[in-house]
Amino acid sequence: METSHGICRIAIALGENHSRALLEQVEHWQGFLALVNMIMFCTGIPGHYPVNETTSSLTLTFWYTLQDDIMSFEAEKQAVYLQVYRPVYFQLVDVLLHKAQFPADEEYASWSSDEKEQFRIYRVDISDTLMYVYEMLGAELLSNLYDKLGRLLTSSDQSTSWQHTEALLYGFQSIAETIDVNYSDVIPGLIGLIPRISITNVQLADTVMFTIGALAEWLADHPVMLSSVLPLVLQALGNPDLSISSVSTLKKICRECKYDLPPYATNIVAVSQEVLIKQIHKTSQCMWLMQALGFLLSALPVEEILRNLHSLITPYIQQLEKLSEETPNPSNKLAIIHILGLLSNLFTTLDITKQDEESGDNQPPVKSAPPQTGPNPVVVVLQQVFALIQNVLSKWLNDSQVVEAVCAIFEKSVKTLLHEFAPMVSQLSEMLGQMYSTIPQSSRSVMDQFAEVLFSLNKHCFSLLTVWLKEALQSPGFPSTRVSEEQKDTFSQQVLRERVNKRRVKDIVKEFTLMCRGLHGTEYAADY
C-alpha cells in the first residue's frame, strides 16, 4: 500500500505541475494520456477512504488543474482536447461516485467517529469536484446520471445495493445545489423516480431529502410536481435521524414555493406542530422549522394566518405565562429562551407585505401573494404577548441571554414589518426606556442588544423613533442625573444620524451608558 501511495504521489505531482506543458506536446499525447489514466487509477484505488486507503483524495486537485488548462486554450485547440478528454471526465464521474459510496452497513458501523467525519469531508470534496466537472460536461452529465438511476430503479435485479442508488442521487444533489438546473429536461423524470426509491437506510433517506431541497427552485417553476415529493418530506420530519435534512428541505420548499403551498398548508402546519410538541428535533432545527412555517403562512389570507398562528403558538404562550411566574432558575431560563427563539424565528419570515421583485425583460411573470387586507398578523400577536414579554424581561433583566432573546423578537419583527411596525413603536420605546433606567446592573452584551433594537427602529421607523427619543429624554433625571440636557441632545442626534453603521450605534450607546453611570473616562470603562 505504501509503495502504490508513493507512486501515485509522483504521478500526481508530475500531472499537477506540468499539465499544460504536457498537453502542448501534441506529438506525445498518448504518453500524457497514459499518465492521466495512471492518475485515474489512483483516484479509483480499491478500498474505502480513509479506512482502507488515503491516496484518492490527493488526486482531486489534478482534475481541476487539467480541466482549467484544457479550457484555457483557444476554441479550435480546445475542441481537439475536449474530443480526447471528455470521455476521460465521464469516466472520472463514474469513479468518483463509486468512491463516494458508503461501505456495507456492518462495516460502516465499525468505523470510528473520526473516520466517519473524514469520509464526510471526502464526499464534500467529491461533490465540489463534480460541480466543477459539470462546467465541462454540461447537460449530458445530468442525462448520464439520470439514465443510470433510471436503469437502477426499474431493474428487476434484487441485488442492487442502496449505496449505488445513494451515490447517483448524491451526484445529482451536488450539481443541483449550485448549478441552475431549471432548464434541464431530466429533472421531471428524476422527481418522478424519487418516490420509487425504497428507503431502508438513514444515509439514503438523508440524500433523498437533500436532493429534493436542492431542487426547490425547480419545484417553484413546476408546482404540479410538489405532490410527488412533499409527502416524503413530511414523513421524514417525524424521524429524529433525518432532522437536519428534512427540516432544511421543508424550509427551502416553503421559501421557494410558498405561493403554491396553500393547498398543502393545513397538513404542513399539523405535521410541524406534532413534531414540535413531541420535541423530536434539537433547538436549531426547531428554529428552522418555525422559519419554514413563517414562509408558508405568508402566502395565506390574513384570517387563515391568524387561525394557524393561534393553534401554533398558543401552547407556547401558555407555557411562557407559567414560566414567567416561577422563580428564575437555570432550567426555566432555557425554556424561556427556547420559546422566545421560536417566536423570533417565526416573525423573521412571516411577511405578508413582501412582494417578489418584478421580473426582467423576457422573463416569465413572478408569482406573488394576493393583496392582503386587515391587521398585520405579527403586530396582532406582538400586541397580545407584549405584557407577558415585559413581565419576563422584568424578572430576567440582569441575564444577558434572556434579554438578547427578547430583543431578537423585536429586532427581527422590525426588519420584517418595516413601517408596519408603527403601532408597536410607542410600547416598545417605553419598554426600552424602562430597560435603560435599570442599565447600571446590566452588562455590555445587554447594551449591545439594546443598541440592535434601537438601530432597527432608526432604520425602519425613523420618524416615530425621533418623536419618542425627544419625549423620553425630556424627562428630568432620565435616564440618569449624571447627564446634562446637552449630552442627552447630542446622544439623540448621534443615534438618529446613524442609519447604516450598526457598530457605530453600539459605540454611541456604550459611551452614553458610561456617562449615565459616571464611568466615562475611568479605568472601569474598559469593562464595557
Image (spheres, rainbow, N blue to C red):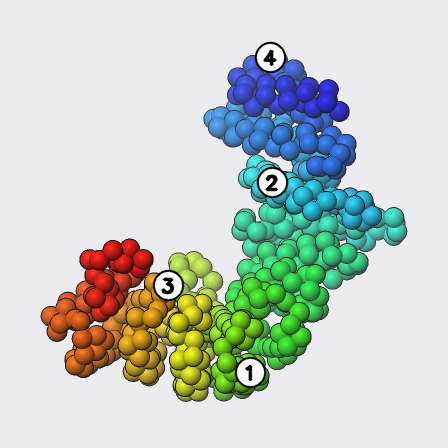
- Residue closer to the observer: 314 or 404: 404
Is 433 on the left-hand or right-hand side of 521? right
Q: Which structural element holds mark 4?
A: helix
Please name the residue shown 44% across and 84% down the image: 388
Query: Badge 4 local density, few (<14 within 10 Å), some, or many (20+)?
Result: few
Q: Image height check: is 243 above or below 65? A: below
- Which circle's residue, 4 or 1, is located before the other in the chain? 4
Q: What's the distance in space between the residues labelled 3 and 4, CA to CA?
A: 69 Å
Q: What's the distance in space between the residues labelled 3 and 1, CA to CA?
A: 27 Å
Query: Badge 1 local density, few (<14 within 10 Å), some, or many (20+)?
Result: some
Verify CB contact (< 8 Å) between mark 3 and mark 1: no
Residue under label 1: 319
Q: Within the image, what quadrant is residue 437 found in? A: bottom left
Residue under label 3: 445
Verify CB contact (< 8 Å) between mark 4 and mark 2: no
Q: What's the distance in space between the residues labelled 2 and 1, CA to CA?
A: 45 Å
| Disc 2 versus disc 1: nearer the observer | 1
Please name the residue shown 45% across and 67% down the image: 401
Q: Which structural element holds mark 2?
A: helix
Q: Position of residue 190 (x, y in %)?
A: 68, 55
- Which circle's residue, 4 or 2, is located before the other in the chain? 4
- Which circle's residue, 3 or 2, is located before the other in the chain? 2
- Using the image, tell me which numbered label, if any, was put on residue 253: none
Residue under label 2: 125
Q: Which structural element holds mark 3?
A: helix
Verify CB contact (< 8 Å) between mark 4 and mark 1: no
Q: What's the distance in space between the residues labelled 4 and 2, CA to CA?
A: 34 Å
Q: What's the distance in space between the residues labelled 4 and 1, CA to CA?
A: 78 Å
